[in-house]
Image (tube, rainbow, N blue to C red):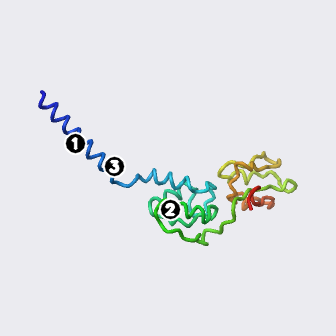
Amino acid sequence: MIAAVLVVGSLTAIIGVALSLAAARLPADRDTLTRRIDALLPQTQCGQCGYAGCRPYAEAIANGDAAINQCAPGGDLTIRAVAELLGQTPRPLNPVYGEHRGPLVATIDEAACIGCLRCLEVCPVDAILGAPRHLHTVLNDLCTGCELCIAPCPVDCISLETRAGHA
């Protein structure tokens, strides 16, 4: 009986040491890397990078399926931060994905808004409030400036402006 306990205890200790050594030598898991990349992205959820939002783009970068220079809203600062995290050389923003214009916020021309709700349906962060056939408004603190609300507006009453306090 004592021999069985010693054998099981020894095997447990050996397996524990082996797992500790393996964990120290293996790269960080993809989910942790994805979260770290996602934290560096601007969270506009705009889709300009070719992915449905910042998290899917971060996953694609972590998996090696996307380049680090596809985020127009993040611009060079974001590209440099992701490159540093991954130990890569930063590259200029790929113009196929747009151009960096700084922090933006949507504004609605109150005189022109017809309350059609189309902008509410596409806002990925629920930054637009309104009711059918009533004036809509943008919650500036929530708006990411993703531009997704502009195209569906039938009266072109939505525009983007530089966020107050930014050049």
Tell which circle, 1 or 3, labels the residue nearer the N-terminal end.
1
Amino acid at the residue labelled 2: Glu
Residue 5 lies, in percent from the top left, at: 16, 30
Q: Give the side of residue 26 with respect to residue 92, left or right.
A: left
Q: Specify the amino acid type for callout 3.
A: Ala
Counting from the top left corner in percent of width and height, residue 96 is at 60, 72
- The quadrant of the image that shows the N terminus is top left
Residue in front for this viewpoint, 58 or 13: 13
Labelled pair 1, 2 in contact (Cβ < 8 Å) = no
Q: Residue 161 is drawn in which quadrant?
A: bottom right
Name the residue rendered at 65%, 69% in the picture.
99
C-beta proximity under 8 Å, tags 3 and 2: no
Label 1 – label 3 distance at C-alpha: 14 Å
Q: On the image, numbered disc 1 is attached to which residue?
A: 14
Of the 4 image quadrants, the one containing the C terminus is bottom right
Give the residue at mark 2: 84
Q: Residues within 10 Å of mark 2 (few under 14, many from 20)?
A: few
Q: Earlier in the sequence, mark 1 or mark 2?
A: 1
Q: Nearer the viewer, residue 125 or 10?
A: 10
- The numbered dot on residue 119 is none
Front-most of 104 and 133?
Answer: 104
- Alpha-carbon neighbours of circle 3 within 10 Å: few (<14), some, or many (≥20)? few
Which residue does the image show at 79% across and 49% down from the upper left? Answer: 137
Q: Residue flagged by tag 1: what amino acid is it?
A: Ile
Return the disc, 3 or 2, that comes first in the chain's sequence: 3
Per the image, the residue denoted by label 3 is: 23
Q: Kindly identify the residue that appears in the image at 19 percent across and 39 percent down.
A: 11
* Image-based side of 16 in relation to 74, left or right: left
Residue lying furthest right in this view? 111
